[in-house]
Amino acid sequence: MNYSMIDILRQHIIERLGPDLDNLDTVLNHFKPLEIERNKYLVKQGEVCKQVYFIAKGCLQVFTYDNDMNETTRDIVTEGTWCSELLSFGSGQPATENIRTVEPCQLLAIDKQGFQQMMQAVPQFDKVYKQILETSYANSVYRINTFVALSALERIKWLMEKRPKLMTRVSSKLIASYLGINKDVFSRLKSQL
């Protein structure tokens, strides 16, 4: 097992729940370390999402395809956070989104059975799970509600203020998809800043 990844996850959990956790090592043993190269799918629309991922290192894109196979990015998820297609994971229904690696990634994955065992072994982990759900929901709703009212240029400025590292970390095409802007318009407006 890659202890550096496990140590990152251990620290993440301790920061949220405090250091006095019974069974923490038992919980951590439920996670499977994965090293995945760039541009690989973790979940595809129409498949059932079978795992929740903690990102120790790397970057994931959560997106859908429209009828013309254009991508619409809902989120770009980076280190120290969780990612899954939660509705599919919880219900066993087909996923409505795709999750793909943007960079080579070091992930810790847990399946539904391990997740349920973890929730029983460390009941406080329910707090972390609620934070995962709330953060995912809040980010999506905030972004959608904010973007409706903002011009394309204002969306770029919003990203530069809220998530400045993404501007140099991921492609202009991916940022344009995330901001809901045509990539050519994005390039033109970005050059004006």
Image (cartoon, rainbow, N blue to C red):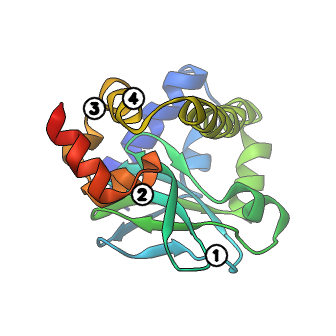
Please name the residue that numbered disc 4 is placed on. Answer: 154
Of callouts 1 and 2, the N-terminal one: 1
Q: Are marks 3 and 4 in contact (CB under 8 Å)?
A: no
Q: Residues within 10 Å of mark 1 (few under 14, many from 20)?
A: some
Distance, label 4 to label 1, CA atoms, is 31 Å
Quadrant of residue 154 within the rendered picture: top left
Please name the residue that numbered disc 1 is placed on. Answer: 45
Q: Choose mark 2 or mark 3, whichever is in front.
A: 3
31 or 151: nearer the eye? 151
Tell me the SS state at disc 4.
helix
Distance, label 2 to label 3, CA atoms, is 16 Å
Q: Position of residue 3 (x, y in %)?
A: 34, 51
From what the image shows, is residue 147 above or below residue 75?
above
Q: Is residue 48 left or right of residue 83?
A: right
Tell me the SS state at disc 2.
strand
Of callouts 4 and 2, the N-terminal one: 2
Distance, label 4 to label 2, CA atoms, is 24 Å
- Pick the quarter of the image with the N terminus: bottom left
Q: Position of residue 47 (x, y in %)?
A: 68, 80
Q: Choose mark 4 or mark 1, whichever is in front.
A: 4
Q: Position of residue 191 (x, y in %)?
A: 15, 41
Disc sitting over residue 164 in the figure: 3
Please name the residue that numbered disc 2 is placed on. Answer: 60
Q: Is residue 31 left or right of residue 134?
A: left
Of callouts 1 and 3, the N-terminal one: 1
181 or 100: nearer the eye? 181
Going by the numbered disc 1, the residue's amino acid type is Gln
Q: Are marks 4 and 2 in contact (CB under 8 Å)?
A: no
Q: Is residue 63 left or right of residue 4?
A: right
Q: Is residue 98 left or right of residue 113?
A: left
Of callouts 3 and 4, the N-terminal one: 4
Going by the numbered disc 2, the residue's amino acid type is Leu
